[in-house]
Image (cartoon, rainbow, N blue to C red):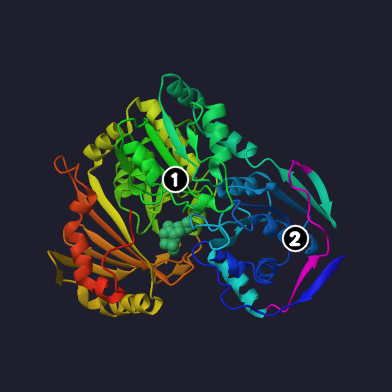
Amino acid sequence: MIQIIPTQPIDGQKPGTSGLRKKTRVFRQPGYLENFVQSIWDGIGGGQGKVLVLGGDGRFFNTQAVQTILRMAAAAGARRVIVGRDGLLSTPAASHLIRSRGADGGVILSASHNPGGEDGDFGVKYNTANGGPAPESVTEAIYQATTQITQYQTLDSSDLDLSAPGTAHLHQTEIEVVDPVAEYAALMEKLFDFGAIRALFDSGFRLRFDAMHAITGPYAQEILVNRLGAADGSVVNATPLPDFGGGHPDPNPVWAHELMGHMMGDAAPDFGAASDGDGDRNMIVGRGVYVTPSDSLAVIAANAHLVPGYAGGLKGVARSMPTSAALDRVAEALGIACFATPTGWKYFGNLLDAGHATLCGEESAGTGSDHIREKDGLWAVLMWLNILAARRQSVAEVMAAHWQEFGRNYYSRHDYEEVDSDAAHALMEDLRARLDRLEGQTFGALRVAEAEDFSYTDPVDGLVTARQGIVVSFDGGARVVLRLSGTGTAGATLRVYLERYVAGPEGLQQDPQTALREVIDAAEALCALHARLGRTAPDVVT
Ligand code: G1P
Ligand code: ZN
């Protein structure tokens, strides 16, 4: 029986960089999830007749939320919902399923790399028929619906058993439970030279993949160990847990310090990698060498022709604006276009759909291609493994050769987390007010060549997205970018992106924080961020 439940708008249900992300406790308030899900249906023109994909990263509240959403999809008249076994799907696997099944869209439950658990974070994201995050026009319609909602519809039915693949009915909606790994693994087999990677492992190549107790455990076990022959035990922290084992499932040197320790130690394997809560991010480490995401993207672009799925060449590449320009140098050498977009994967969708770009990535450990419409952690790992197998070189050798050829964009991001929101907004506004006057001024040892508030005009639909981060470029090509995070759930997070180019052949093996010293000092001189935020150092340096 369909139930119509009266409700009223709840403040703050505005999707951010990547869906609606809140404390789990907020999502568990009566009607909170229901209001947002009903608003999704309202924002996309109703659920009647739709085919939807549903799954999440398994964090606390995933199980309950999946059942709630199934009931609401059935009450809305959806034709079919394809749901991962036990309500699980990695974000890339969900994106692939939406595309391969020709679904109208999908609901993904995740707060990505944010901690999970009762006191952690939860999130809900809507992806459209191309498999990618809903564009601004759709998230805005959803948000408008949250401000006008008067009722939601659900069923008074009991929970469905989602523990095994098969088909069931809920009201008039067909519910298809699928193995979360199978179709994704099949796609990877099509893109990569599994034979060459298997031969690499057969020759004694050793790998450590840290799933950080998040969703990629089962995917990595199946693909890397079962299908590619990596040694048993190569995938660690492989069992997904509702609170990610109390950890912070963000694959960077700070949160994946256990893996970093292994990779920098005497007994390091040849290759290390990690992924995040929902499986779309990646971290790449060689023995004794950490590869920044910006460099990883550039290396992948420069070597993509070695991978069967990309042997035909790249149509173009794209990066988020704060990502380093290492990619631009590769694009120039390849003679292809390189786009700079605002932060957030949703801005890549149009470029991929229109065939303007094949590869894209962000400095925040997201890399991907037009095989789906999300970034893809395991895909990036397989890219690297395929490239290493083809080049017969170590990670350190690949990096050294890359920098020799293209020069090196030293890069680092300094995050000030959970700072006072008013102070952070005031800092940005004050800087905005000074932008016109900055050119020619000197901060520390660096002189400003250009300052702007980044604005993006989508080349496909012409939509303009303004105020996407303040970019201060200095003489000689160094730059600082400042922007506020759109994914945090407490206070504000200020991200300071620092970059400097060294052409080589000398000076290519410096420590990034040392190489960036003048840029870091210039950023401080520019906006006195420590004094204004009441901090003495960043919380996270990547
Ligand atoms: C962060 C990253 C961004 C990424 C997003 C979702 O957003 O910076 O690159 O697309 O998470 O994974 P932010 O918190 O900076 O808004
Ligand atoms: Zn993620």
N-term-proximal mark, 1 vs 2? 2
Is 154 included in the stretch rendered in magenta? yes
Q: Position of residue 392 (x, y in %)?
A: 35, 24
Q: What kind of residue is marked 2?
A: Ala
Say whether residue 95 is left or right of residue 364: right
Q: Quadrant of the N terminus?
A: bottom right
Is 446 included in the stretch rendered in magenta? no
Mark 2 crowdedness (10 Å alpha carbons): few <14, some 14-19, many ≥20: many
Q: Pick out the residue farthest to the left.
A: 445
**Residue at x 60%, y 73% (from the top left corner):** 143
Say whether residue 436 is left or right of residue 44: left
Q: Which residue is mark 2?
A: 73
Q: Magenta stretch: give its range.
A: 149-166
Q: Which mark is residue 282?
A: 1
For ligand 1, which image quadrant applies? bottom left
- Whether residue 207 appears in this view of the structure is yes
SS at mark 1? strand
Q: What kind of residue is marked 1?
A: Asn
Look at the picture and state if 265 lies above or below 420. above
Mark 1 crowdedness (10 Å alpha carbons): few <14, some 14-19, many ≥20: many
**Residue at x 18%, y 64% (from the top left corner):** 521
**Residue at x 57%, y 50% (from the top left corner):** 91
